[in-house]
């Protein structure tokens, strides 16, 4: 339905940034596009790159701009850490949409007229400094929240996953529960580098980890985890390599796997 979308990458094609999440509205794809830099940098990109950092709709081979998340981050800077934006995940609601801005550490609401407003800001944390930084033993450094995915739960609240920024501490990522007008609360924790979330038809939450042992471990083994009562973890599978996306439907999980593997990416179906 849409072609010619921007792919922002290094000269060798690695670290590509482009459309990051998609949903459907009235039969038309609605999707976020990444940017992963200061909103002001978008002006330096060629014409196709001017759609980066936005919520878009594809129809009839054309792309319609629904909202400018990067522009909002540049003006509002909700987390107060300096304007940086990377729209990552979108969920439709009865009154518009919500979008996770991973670099902005926030969840924003998109009204039907395209107006953007802040729903929640997610807190950073202190993490052990990795040895390669050469800091004294026991030194701590800040790690940004880096929210990655948003889904609406059966209770109507929004559930937002967390990657955690560098140094990507193992076991320190959480799933937040967000009720508009209230501060985010931790629903479940103890995860590592969460990439995506999904609820099944019974209201059970599934968490997809990009790197089960941490991004600095050098091990790209991912994991699908079922969240049980009290936030308990049940590992469904670790037979994954740097998985990126998750959907649950009809008693099965659909996972985009090995997206960082040139020519070897795949979508797998896993009965639950």
Image: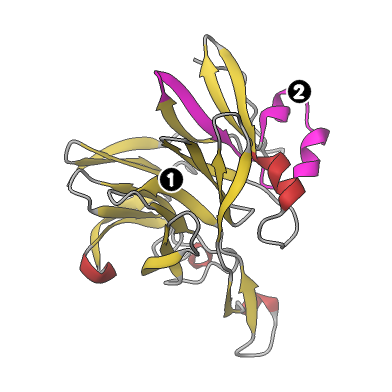
Question: On screen, 102 above or below 137?
Answer: above
Horizontal placement of 76 versus 64: left or right?
A: right
Q: Residues within 10 Å of mark 1 (few under 14, many from 20)?
A: many
State the residue lying farthest toward the right: 44
Disc number at residue 47?
A: 2
Residue at (57%, 68%) from the top-left corner? Answer: 123
Q: Is residue 233 visible?
A: yes
Q: Secondary structure at mark 1?
A: loop
The one of 4 and 201 positioned closer to us in this rendering: 201
Q: Residue 124: percent from the left, percent from the top?
A: 58, 69
Question: Number of callouts in the render?
Answer: 2
Q: From the viewer's perspective, is 253 left or right of 173?
A: left
Quadrant of residue 237 within the rendered picture:
bottom left
Which percent across, then down, holds residue 188?
A: 35, 67
Q: Nearer the viewer, residue 188 or 265?
A: 188
Q: Secondary structure at mark 2?
A: helix
Give the quarter of the image for residue 34: top right
Q: Mark 1, mark 2: which one is toward the viewer?
A: 2
Q: Residue at x 70, y 81 (%)?
A: 134
Q: CA distance from mark 1 to mark 2?
A: 28 Å
Indicate whether residue 35 is drawn in magenta.
yes
Image position of 92 (left or right of 232) = right
Please report the bounds of the magenta region as a residue range: 25-52
> Colour mode?
secondary structure
Query: Taking the image as drawn, is residue 14 in sight?
Result: no
Q: Is residue 2 above or below residue 221?
A: above
Residue located farthest toward the top when viewing the structure as drawn? 60
Q: Is residue 223 above or below residue 189?
A: above
Residue 74, labelled with which disc? none
Q: Which residue is mark 1?
A: 244
Q: For the point 78% across and 26% down, which residue is it?
A: 46
231 falls in the magenta region:
no
């Amino acid at each position: 339905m849409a072609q010619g979308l921007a792919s922002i990458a290094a000269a060798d094609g690695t670290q590509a940034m482009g459309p990051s999440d998609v949903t459907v509205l009235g039969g038309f794809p609605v999707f976020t596009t990444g940017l992963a830099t200061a909103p002001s940098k978008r002006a330096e990109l060629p014409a196709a790159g001017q759609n980066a950092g936005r919520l878009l709709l594809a129809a009839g081979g054309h792309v319609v701009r629904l909202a400018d998340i990067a522009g909002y981050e540049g003006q509002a800077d909700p987390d107060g850490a300096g304007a940086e934006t990377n729209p990552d995940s979108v969920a439709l609601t009865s009154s518009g949409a919500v979008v996770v801005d991973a670099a902005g550490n926030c969840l924003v609401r998109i009204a039907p007229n395209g107006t953007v407003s802040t729903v929640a800001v997610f807190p950073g944390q202190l993490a052990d400094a990795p040895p390669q930084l050469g800091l004294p033993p026991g030194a701590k450094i800040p790690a940004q929240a880096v929210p990655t995915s948003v889904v609406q739960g059966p209770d109507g609240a929004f559930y937002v996953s967390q990657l955690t920024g560098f140094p990507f501490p193992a076991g320190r990522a959480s799933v937040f529960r967000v009720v508009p007008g209230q501060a985010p609360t931790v629903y479940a924790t103890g995860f590592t580098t969460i990439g995506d979330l999904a609820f099944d038809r019974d209201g059970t939450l599934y968490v997809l980890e990009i790197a089960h042992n941490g991004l600095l471990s050098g091990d790209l083994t991912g994991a699908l985890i079922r969240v049980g009562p009290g936030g308990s973890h049940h590992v469904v599978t670790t037979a994954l390599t740097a998985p990126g996306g998750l959907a649950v439907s009809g008693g099965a999980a659909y996972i985009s796997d090995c997206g960082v593997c040139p020519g070897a990416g795949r979508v797998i179906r896993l009965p639950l």
